[in-house]
Image: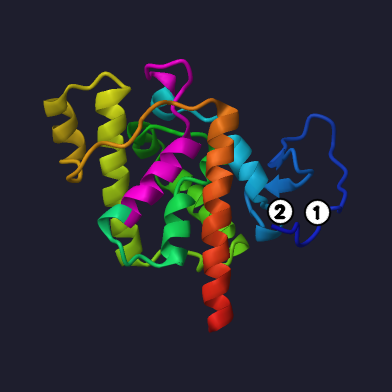
Amino acid sequence: MGKSGSSSWKTTLTPGSPRAWQRMLSGRRLDLLDPSPLDIEIEDIAHGLARVARWNGQTTGEHAFSVAQHSVLVESLVGRLWSTTSASDLLGALLHDAPEYVIGDMISPFKTALGVDYRQFEARLEAAIRLRFGLTPHMSDDAKARVKQADQCAAFFEATRLAGFDIDEALNFFGHPPPGGPPDMTPLSPTEAQTLFLRRFAALITEVDAASAKG
């Protein structure tokens, strides 16, 4: 993906004044309060998500189970459960937790406690990310429902295979997993998870671009 746009503008800060932007390894400077699609790069997203742990890191294995690996799992479950899902909606599934490359993976009870301001911030960042990669600012209701169900299925597998939940407890919180064998849940290293995420993104964005070219 090319680095469209520019964030070369400069600003003068009063020493000690609050900073509301994040410097990325790509060189982009992302305004956290008013994020621009032009300051978002998939390499930054993949790098960040591969280093954010699901379940606050309370999982078994040599490595944490990252949000990058979780995102690939959710996208694969959407494709498995709804085989006719468009490439755009699959890309949306892959990016469903992309804001966490900036804000981290906050467990659901804490998100609820923080309330509407947090969710509005998350929604603004999600819209900027989706626009950056040629998607509509928000998922359709149907796509959102599919991603939510796949996310619950992924959480079931993570909870029972990595996070110490017993089956009955996981069923109570996350519902029944899909039929068929469970996916490989071996936590990957950050570098491996980052590569996996970028590889899947590259395949999907190629499909999205091809579909767009056809009109």
Q: CA distance from mark 1 to mark 2?
A: 7 Å
Judging depth in this view, the residue of 112 and 165 nearest the camera is: 165
SS at circle 1: loop
Rendered image quadrant of residue 83: bottom left
Instruction: Work out which quarter of the rendered image holds the N terminus and state it.
Output: bottom right
**What residue appears at the point 84 percent right and 31 percent down from the top-left corner?**
15
Mark 2 neighbour class, 10 Å CA radius: few under 14, some 14 to 19, many 20 or more? many
- Which residue bears the numbered disc 1? 7
Is residue 63 magenta-colored? Answer: yes
**Percent x, y of residue 187:** 44, 26
Relative to 60, residue 168 above or below: below
User: Residue furthest toward the front?
Assistant: 181
Relative to 156, residue 126 above or below: below
Rendered image quadrant of residue 171: top left
Left/right placement of residue 180 relative to residue 18 reads left
Relative to 47, residue 86 above or below: below
Is residue 213 magenta-colored? Answer: no
Task: Name the N-terminal-most of marks 1 and 2.
Answer: 1
Looking at the rendered structure, the kind of residue marked 2 is Asp
- Which residue bears the numbered disc 2? 39
Left/right placement of residue 23 relative to residue 140 reads right
Looking at the rendered structure, the kind of residue marked 1 is Ser
The magenta region covers 57-79
Could you tell me if the residues under marks 1 and 2 are in contact, i.e. CB atoms within 8 Å?
Answer: yes
